[in-house]
Image (tube, rainbow, N blue to C red):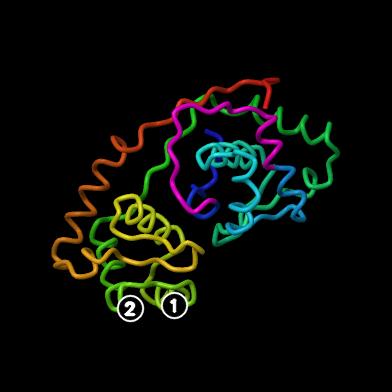
Amino acid sequence: MRPRAPALLLALLGSVVAAPALAFTPERAGLMVDAMRALDCSMNGEQAEASLAPLGLEGIEVQAFVDTLFGAGLVSLSEDMTVLSLVPMLCAAGPEESMAMIVEAFEAQESSIERWRPDFTPERGAELIATLRGLDCVLTEERAQEVLPPLGFTPVETRDIVAVLVDGTLAEVAEDGTALRLTESVCSADPSMDAPALQALLASWDERHPAPEIVIEQGADQ
């Protein structure tokens, strides 16, 4: 089994996207690589949303590209998984050499892409909801850095819980992406209902997010 990058959908594009069918091609991966090269070969979440969405790259597509390039040792992730970087060899490569490396990575990639699933217990998710209630149901980036680490919430765990909260319409992210807010009904709800609600969302995740059909092609038009 080749190494797989941790899921980056939320970190890079701010949402979990399900697409019915995508052309998983080296050429489209090259669009992502070129966009990163234009940013000095590193990309954080804010830059990704601004740079990749206008290129028509979907979140699930980007995740697949990251997995493929990560498995081939062509990209790396920061420890908190918020910054994706090209390795120096790919960063400095010319167009033909760059595409050759991407094609080689695709040739080595397994044809089926592992489905991403949030990984946390309902009780742990309920703890995060309780934390938000203690902050008037709003969690800003600054407060998250102050409050969550002492409670043992890691970036990965927080990302997964937030993904389910937003996907299940229990919370919403501010338009500028700097704050998370519980919906009014959840903010005032009985805390004893939090874990069961999250359990139901986790249990139905695969049903609500069927695996996309990824077609691996080479030499296809962009």
135 vs 194: above or below: below
Inspect the image, locate mark 1, and give the three-letter code of the amino acid beneath it: Arg
Q: Residue 162's image quarter?
A: bottom left
State the image coordinates of residue 165 (x, y, percent, origin top left). Answer: 32, 56
Q: Secondary structure at mark 2?
A: loop
Q: How many marks?
A: 2
Q: Is residue 4 left or right of residue 160?
A: right
The local secondary structure at tag 1 comes to helix
Magenta includes 174?
Answer: no
Alpha-carbon distance for marks 2 and 1?
Answer: 9 Å
Residue 221, image x, y percentages: 68, 22
Give the residue at x 71% y 28%: 103
Q: Where does residue 122 sit, x and y in percent of width and height?
A: 24, 56
Q: Which mark is residue 128?
A: none
Q: Which mark is residue 143?
A: 1
Tag 1: Cα neighbours inside 10 Å, few (<14), some, or many (≥20)? few
Q: Amino acid at mark 2?
A: Leu
**Residue 39 found in image quarter:** bottom right
Q: Are marks 2 and 1 in contact (CB under 8 Å)?
A: yes
Q: Which mark is residue 135?
A: 2
Does residue 56 appear to the left or right of 20 in the view shown?
Answer: right
- Residue 27 magenta-highlighted: yes
Quarter occupied by the C terminus:
top right
What residue sits 50% from the left and 39% below the top?
60
Q: Residues within 10 Å of mark 2 (few under 14, many from 20)?
A: some
The magenta stretch is 13-32
